[in-house]
Amino acid sequence: MRTRLVFNQRGVTLIEMLVVLVISALLVGGIYRLFVAQTRAYTVQDQVVEVQQSIRGAMEIMLRDFRLAGFDSDSINSRIDIPTPVLVGDHSVTVSYEYDDTTQFTVVYQQDAAAQTLTRQLTTTKDDGTTVAGPQEVVLLNVEALDFMYGVDANPVDGAMDAGGWISATTVNNRKVVAVQVTLTARAAEVNPDLQVTSPRTLVTAVTLRNQCLRGDF
């Protein structure tokens, strides 16, 4: 007796294959869009972190010079005198201090509004009057604002900042500057126009000019 085996020979139709291809394409497209969105978000966050670190680095460079403002070793071998430790401005500031017994450092920080940069320029003055002005070094790029406010001491005895708080350069007059508040705003470089435009970041820092607090010459 013969046994007849029957096999189901039905295959995949063209319509079924097209449906599977469409569904697969939609899944791949969704995964790709998610990947692109995550990549852009990561790039934006990386730019934000980079500009924040750059602002902090630039601020530390400024604060280092501010802390030295008015420094005079008072050594018997020193031939340097610092008559003007701080020259104030609303968007620039100049500080001077003794580097060694024969050299004075004068440092200018200012914003180049056209180039959107924060620059630092060092001028050295020797005890024989020789002056050498260095180049304007770019400390930070994409700077949108650089503002200075000042704490003054009208009483040269206590060496403390007046209770009036921070004032602008135009109201300092001849009072001794004992503290500086710096507001620095910068934006991340937009390297890809397709990315989300990041908002600028601002860092506000105040520093006491300790050498000014110790000086009783005002």
Image (cartoon, rainbow, N blue to C red):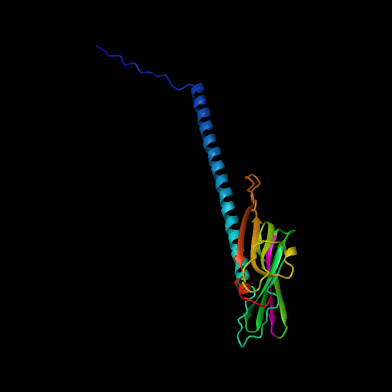
Query: How many numbered callouts?
Result: 0
Q: Nearer the viewer, residue 86 or 34?
A: 86
Snapshot quadrant of residue 85: bottom right
Above or below: residue 96 compared with residue 180 = below
The percent position of residue 148, horizontal first and vertical second, equals 68, 62
Q: Nearer the viewer, residue 211 or 101?
A: 211
Query: For this view, does 15 lie left or right of residue 208?
Result: left
Residue drawn at point x = 66 percent, y = 86 percent:
79
Above or below: residue 97 compared with residue 189 = below
The percent position of residue 185, horizontal first and vertical second, equals 65, 56
The percent position of residue 158, horizontal first and vertical second, equals 61, 72
Snapshot quadrant of residue 150: bottom right
**Residue interval drawn in magenta:** 117-127
Q: Nearer the viewer, residue 13 or 160?
A: 160
Q: Is residue 86 in the magenta section?
A: no
Residue drawn at point x = 60 percent, y = 71 percent:
210
Above or below: residue 171 compared with residue 215 = above
Instruction: Look at the image and tell me in which quarter the N terminus lies.
Output: top left
Instruction: Look at the image and tell me in which quarter the C terminus lies.
Output: bottom right
Query: For this view, does 89 lie left or right of residue 52?
Result: right
Residue drawn at point x = 65 percent, y = 58 percent:
184
Snapshot quadrant of residue 145: bottom right
The percent position of residue 96, horizontal first and vertical second, equals 67, 74
Above or below: residue 181 compared with residue 31 = below
Q: Would you say the magenta stretch is mainly helix, strand or loop?
A: strand
